[in-house]
Amino acid sequence: MKKALIIGLLLGVGLPTGLAADKSVISAIEKSGGLVLPWPGEQDAWEVEFHLRGRDLEDDGLSAVAALKTVVALNLRDTKITSEGLKHLKGLSKLKRLHLERTAVDDAGVSHLTGLENLEYLNLYGTKITDKALDQLSSLKNLKQLYVWQTEVTDDGVAKINKALPNLKIVKGVDLSKIVIVKKEEPKPEEIVKWLAVGGPEKPPAKSKPGSFLIITFQNKSNQDVKLYWVDYGGGKKLYGEISKGAERKQNTYSDAVWLVTDNKDKPLGYFVAGTKTALAVIPK
């Protein structure tokens, strides 16, 4: 018994609270192309994203997400899910943010969301919903932002739900003819992230740590195309994209995230470790 307890404790070393118990569920989500990240500021809370590498996700794949009960944010944008798949989300009582834009979801699918009492943000842009969906959502008292651009929702439907939820901000679309375009400079990076060459004197951490959200611009000044991998919280490597010679990539990340750069044959070239501010990471020649 004592030996089993010690082994159990060792298995949890270095992992966020609750990760050991959820490891098999997280693995199933990742096999479907999902990315699972700890939600900043909340213990045992998760953000799950499929819009980057999991766009082939279908309805059955949501059963794995449903098993991870403490999901706070879920991004299903551009996936192949339908209204039928949303029945798997009924038990996600902690869900606050849900992206469903450009999916095949319609009014029937929205009916599966009416029990998500903590939902604050819902994006239904480019779906098949009508005013009927808004009637169903009027029971969600914590809903603060709703996107219904390029749907069959009417002004009358918007007015009706606004009476029920006066604090709800609804984005129905924009009249492009009334927009005055003002050229605005993009924010400049505040830091330069140090390049840690493979074989050099400085070694990167073995894995990333949870942190605060920021953006890094990766500039490829080498003489070859490269691949960009995120070193996850368990030390595994996940491909995020390729950067052509002379090109750059703006990448969402968290502070203390470790990024690996390889050549096209996956030979490691060097690492970057994210700081705490918007930054520039230059891949040298």
Image (spheres, rainbow, N blue to C red):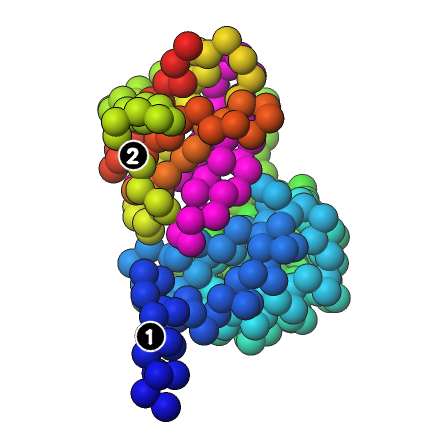
The residue sitting at 38% across, 77% down in the picture is 8
Image quadrant containing the C terminus: top left
Q: Circle 2 sits in a helix, a strand or a loop, which is it?
A: loop
The residue type indicated by label 1 comes to Leu
The residue sitting at 39% across, 14% down in the picture is 284
Q: Is residue 25 above or below residue 236?
A: below
- Tell which circle, 2 or 1, labels the residue nearer the N-terminal end: 1
Range of magenta residues: 227-255
Name the mark on residue 148. Answer: none
Q: How many marks?
A: 2
Image quadrant containing the N terminus: bottom left
User: Which residue lies under the disc numbered 1?
Assistant: 9
Front residue of 146/206: it is 206
Left/right placement of residue 88 relative to residue 253 reads right
User: Which residue lies under the disc numbered 2?
Assistant: 203
Q: Give the x, y percent position of residue 14.
A: 32, 61
In which quarter of the view is residue 9 placed? Answer: bottom left
Q: Give the x, y percent position of residue 141.
A: 45, 69
Determine the CA span between mark 2 and mark 1. 28 Å
Q: Give the x, y percent position of residue 120.
A: 44, 60
